[in-house]
Image (cartoon, rainbow, N blue to C red):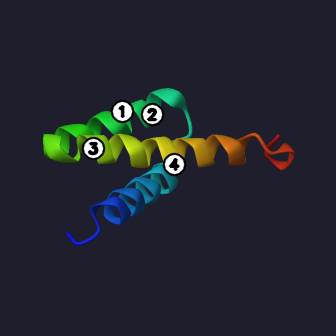
Amino acid sequence: SRDPRGDFKASMVDMILAKQMFGAEELERLLICFLSLNSVRYHGLIFEVFSEICEALFRILSLPFFF
């Protein structure tokens, strides 16, 4: 792929939204899945993308209108 970062990000976001994965355990399983399905050379990038998504997700979920 020419844009592995974008591909990983889009795929993770799609999976999170499709499966409504918002809990820590669910997200951890998603991360483990991505790591197990992809080459070790992409693991650092996968961790970076996963961290960015989680930061954004938890920031959004902490907004008052989600309660």
Q: Earlier in the sequence, mark 1 or mark 4?
A: 1
Where residue 21 sits: x, y (%)? 50, 42
Identified by mark 2, the residue type is Glu
Report how far apart the C-alphas of labels 4 and 2 lie in the structure. Answer: 14 Å
Identified by mark 1, the residue type is Arg
The correct choice, above or below, for 57 with respect to 6 in the image is above
Label 4 with label 3: CB-CB less than 8 Å: no
Label 4 with label 2: CB-CB less than 8 Å: no
Q: Badge 2: how crowded within 10 Å, few (<14), some, or many (20+)? A: some
Q: Earlier in the sequence, mark 4 or mark 2?
A: 2
Where residue 63 sits: x, y (%)? 80, 45
Which residue corresponds to the image point at 37% horizontal and 65% vertical from the top-left? 6
Report how far apart the C-alphas of labels 1 and 2 lie in the structure. Answer: 5 Å
The residue at which mark 4 appears reads as 53
The residue at which mark 1 appears reads as 29
Q: Which mark is residue 34?
A: 3
Q: Earlier in the sequence, mark 3 or mark 1?
A: 1
User: Is 17 positioned to the left or the right of 50 in the image?
Assistant: right
Label 1 with label 2: CB-CB less than 8 Å: yes
Which residue corresponds to the image point at 31% horizontal and 48% vertical from the top-left? 45
Report how far apart the C-alphas of labels 3 and 1 lie in the structure. Answer: 9 Å
